[in-house]
C-alpha cells in the first residue's frame, strides 16, 4: 500500500516575530511559534497515531513525516492550519504532501525516496512563490492596533474578559495557561504597552499572553519556557538567563544594542553529496533523521558554549534569543559582546560540523555566515533584522565567491541614528572598497582570499591597549584623508606626513609594525590601514587591553 510523504513549513517567520518593536511581543511571538512546532504539532501527530519511526523531523518551524492515507493527510493538514489560525493569527504556514511508494525499507516504484523528498520541497517552494493575500483594512471606520499598526482592534481593556470569551481564548476545554490567566495583570500589560490606549488586536494579544507565560513559575505544568526553544537548552544546562523588560535595557551607556543573525552554509551541497554515497533508501531516511537532530543540537550547543565563554565573568547571562534552531540564530545582545559572541558561535559551530561531515566521509564543510547590526535600541526591530539579514547575505556571498568554502564569514554595520538607511546604497555612495578603507566581510577561519575577523579584533585591542593607546582622532584623520577626492595622491602623501609629524614615536613605530607597505610612497598610500573604516566602525564596541 502506498503512503504519503507530508511536509509542514512555517514561512515568513521573521515578519511574524518582528511585526512590532515591543520586546514583550517579540519574545512572545518567538516562543509561541516554538511552542506550536515543538509541542502542539507532535500532539496532533500523536492524535492520528503517527509512529516515531514515520517522523523524519520536527523542529525549527518545519516537519516531515509519513502518513498511511490521503484522508489522514487531509485531516492532519486541516488540524494544523486550524491550530495556527487560532494560536498564531496572521502567521504563515504551508502544507503539502505527495504519494510515495516507499514502504519503510525501499521504494517499490521507479521514484526513489530522495527524489520524492526533492519534489515535495519543490512543491512547497512553488506554493511559497505564490505569496500570500493581504487584507486591506485602510478604512476610516476600522480602528488599527496601536502596537503592530496593521491589524484591526478586536479587544479592549474596558470589557477584556468578555472579549476574551468572544475570541474563544478563555473558556471550557482551553489550555490551562489560558484559563489560569491573571486577567487583571493582562489588562495592566495591555494598558502599559498601548500607552493607556487599551486596544489590541488578536495577534498581539496572543503574543503578549505567551510572553507572560515565560515569566511564569518555572515548575509550572504549562510553562512554555521549560518546554521549548533555546531557553529549554539553557534551563537543562542550569544556566540562569536574565530577561530584560525592554530593548533599552540591553543597551550600553549610549543606548546601543547588538543584533546578530546567522544562517548555515553548505547544507545543500552536503545533502546533495550524501546521496552519492552508496546506501539504501532506509539508510538515507535514517541519515535525514540523524542529521536534522544533529544540526539543531549543534546550533543550540554552539551558541550556549559561546555565551558561557564570553560571559564567564558575568553574574548572569543576558540576551533575547528570538530564533535558535535548525541552522538559524537571531539574538539581541549587548553591543560590546555581540561581535565576540557571533564569532565564537561561528567558530564552535564550524568545528563541530566539520567533525560530523568528516566522519561521514564528505569534504563539504557546513559553516555559518553572520550579519551583525549595532544600533540604537529605539530603532525599529524589523528594520534592524532586515539590515542584519542583508549583511548575512553579503557574508554568504563572499564565501561562495571565494569558492574555498571552508569557513563562514561575518559582515557588520554600526547604525548611529534611529533612522533607517539603505546599507547597500550607503556603502556604494562613498566608494568604501574603491578607497581601500573597508575589507568586510571577514572570514571566521583562516582563508587566503580574505582577512580573518580575529585579526581585526586583535588590531583594535592593540590600538586601545595601555602600551599603544593610539589616538582615535588620528585614525579618523587618516580615514578622512583616504576618502578625500579633492586631493591627488602626492598631496595625500604630503598631508599624511603632516599627520605623522604630530604623532608620538611609539605610534609611528606601531604603524610600521602592522603595515607591510611603503605608505609614504604615493602609489602605495591607499594600502595604509586598508580596513580603517572597519576599525573606526567598531572601535567603541571592542574592549581594549591585552587578551
Image (spheres, rainbow, N blue to C red):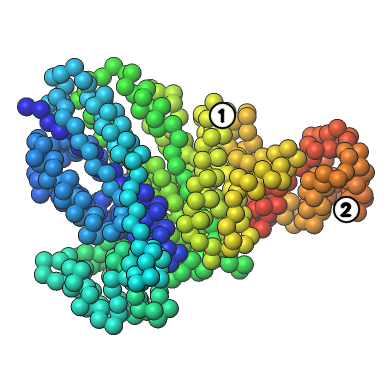
Please tell me whether residue 132 is drawn above or below residue 396 in the rendered image: below
Which image quarter is the N terminus in? top left
**Disc 1 or disc 2, which is closer to the eye?**
1
- Along the horizontal axis of the image, is 135 left or right of 314? left
Q: Residues within 10 Å of mark 1 (few under 14, many from 20)?
A: few
Please provide percent x and percent y for residue 282. 20, 25
What x and y, as percent, mark residue 530?
74, 40
Cα gap from disc 1 to disc 2, whole angstroms: 41 Å
Report the residue marked by disc 2: 504
Number of residue marks: 2
395 vs 206, left or right, is right
Mark toward the start of the polypeptide (1 vs 2): 1
Farthest left residue? 1
Q: Nearer the viewer, residue 417 or 223?
A: 417
Please tell me how crowded label 2 is: few (under 14), some (14-19), or many (20+) other residues with Cα within 10 Å.
few
Q: Nearer the viewer, residue 533 or 225?
A: 533
Mark number, residue 455: none
Residue depicted at 82% across the width and 44% down the height: 485
Q: Which residue is mark 1?
A: 401
**Relative to 446, is 85 above or below?**
below
Which one is nearer the viewer's eye here, 351 or 487?
487
Q: Residue at point 56% right, 42% down?
A: 410
Q: Is residue 348 left or right of residue 417?
A: left
> Which residue is pictured at 22% across the width and 73% down the height?
164
Amino acid at each position: 500500500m502506498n503512503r504519503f510523504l507530508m511536509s509542514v513549513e512555517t514561512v515568513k517567520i521573521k515578519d511574524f516575530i518582528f511585526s512590532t518593536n515591543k520586546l514583550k511581543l517579540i519574545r512572545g511571538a518567538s516562543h509561541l511559534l516554538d511552542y506550536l512546532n515543538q509541542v502542539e504539532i507532535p500532539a496532533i501527530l500523536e492524535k492520528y497515531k503517527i509512529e516515531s519511526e514515520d517522523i523524519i523531523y520536527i523542529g525549527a518551524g518545519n516537519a516531515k513525516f509519513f502518513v498511511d492515507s490521503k484522508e489522514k493527510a487531509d485531516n492532519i493538514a486541516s488540524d494544523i492550519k486550524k491550530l495556527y489560525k487560532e494560536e498564531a493569527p496572521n502567521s504563515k504556514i504551508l502544507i503539502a504532501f505527495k504519494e510515495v511508494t516507499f514502504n519503510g525499507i525501499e521504494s517499490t516504484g521507479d521514484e526513489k525516496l530522495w527524489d520524492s523528498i526533492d519534489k515535495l520541497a519543490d512543491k512547497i517552494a512553488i506554493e511559497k512563490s505564490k505569496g500570500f493575500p493581504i487584507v486591506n483594512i485602510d478604512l476610516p471606520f476600522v480602528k488599527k492596533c496601536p502596537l503592530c499598526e496593521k491589524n484591526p482592534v478586536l479587544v479592549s481593556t474596558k470589557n477584556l474578559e468578555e472579549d476574551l470569551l468572544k475570541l474563544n481564548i478563555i473558556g471550557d476545554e482551553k489550555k490551562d495557561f489560558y484559563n489560569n490567566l491573571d486577567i487583571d495583570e493582562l489588562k495592566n500589560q495591555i494598558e502599559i504597552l498601548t500607552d493607556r490606549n487599551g486596544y489590541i488586536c488578536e495577534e498581539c494579544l496572543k503574543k503578549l499572553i505567551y510572553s507572560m507565560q515565560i515569566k511564569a513559575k518555572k515548575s509550572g505544568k504549562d510553562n512554555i519556557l521549560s518546554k521549548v526553544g533555546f531557553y529549554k537548552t539553557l534551563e537543562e544546562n542550569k544556566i540562569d538567563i536574565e530577561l530584560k523588560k525592554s530593548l533599552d535595557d540591553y543597551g550600553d551607556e549610549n543606548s546601543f544594542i547588538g543584533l546578530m543573525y546567522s544562517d548555515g552554509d553548505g547544507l545543500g551541497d552536503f545533502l546533495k553529496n550524501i546521496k552519492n554515497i552508496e546506501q539504501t533508501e532506509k539508510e538515507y531516511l535514517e541519515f535525514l533523521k540523524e542529521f536534522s537532530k544533529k544540526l539543531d543540537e549543534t546550533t543550540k550547543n554552539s551558541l550556549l558554549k559561546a555565551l558561557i565563554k564570553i560571559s564567564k565573568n558575568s553574574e548572569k547571562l543576558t540576551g533575547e534569543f528570538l530564533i535558535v534552531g535548525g541552522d538559524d540564530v537571531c539574538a539581541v545582545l549587548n553591543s560590546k559582546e555581540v561581535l565576540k559572541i557571533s564569532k565564537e558561535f561561528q567558530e564552535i559551530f564550524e568545528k563541530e560540523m566539520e567533525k560530523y561531515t568528516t566522519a561521514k566521509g564528505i569534504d563539504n564543510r557546513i559553516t555559518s555566515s553572520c550579519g551583525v547590526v549595532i544600533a540604537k535600541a529605539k530603532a525599529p526591530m524589523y528594520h534592524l533584522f532586515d539590515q542584519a539579514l542583508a549583511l548575512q547575505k553579503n557574508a554568504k556571498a563572499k564565501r561562495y565567491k571565494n569558492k574555498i568554502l571552508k569557513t563562514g564569514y561575518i559582515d557588520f554595520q554600526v547604525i548611529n541614528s534611529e533612522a533607517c538607511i539603505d546599507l547597500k546604497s550607503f556603502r556604494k555612495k562613498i566608494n568604501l572598497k574603491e578607497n581601500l578603507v573597508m575589507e568586510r566581510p571577514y572570514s571566521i577561519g583562516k582563508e587566503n582570499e580574505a582577512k580573518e575577523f580575529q585579526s581585526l579584533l586583535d588590531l583594535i585591542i592593540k590600538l586601545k591597549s595601555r602600551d599603544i593607546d593610539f589616538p582615535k582622532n588620528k585614525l579618523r584623520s587618516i580615514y578622512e584623508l583616504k576618502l578625500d577626492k579633492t586631493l591627488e595622491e602626492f598631496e595625500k602623501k604630503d598631508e599624511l606626513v603632516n599627520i605623522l609629524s604630530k604623532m608620538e614615536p611609539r605610534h609611528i613605530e606601531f604603524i610600521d609594525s602592522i603595515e607591510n607597505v611603503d605608505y609614504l610612497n604615493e602609489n602605495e598610500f591607499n594600502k595604509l590601514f586598508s580596513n580603517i573604516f572597519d576599525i573606526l566602525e567598531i572601535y567603541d564596541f571592542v574592549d581594549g587591553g591585552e587578551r
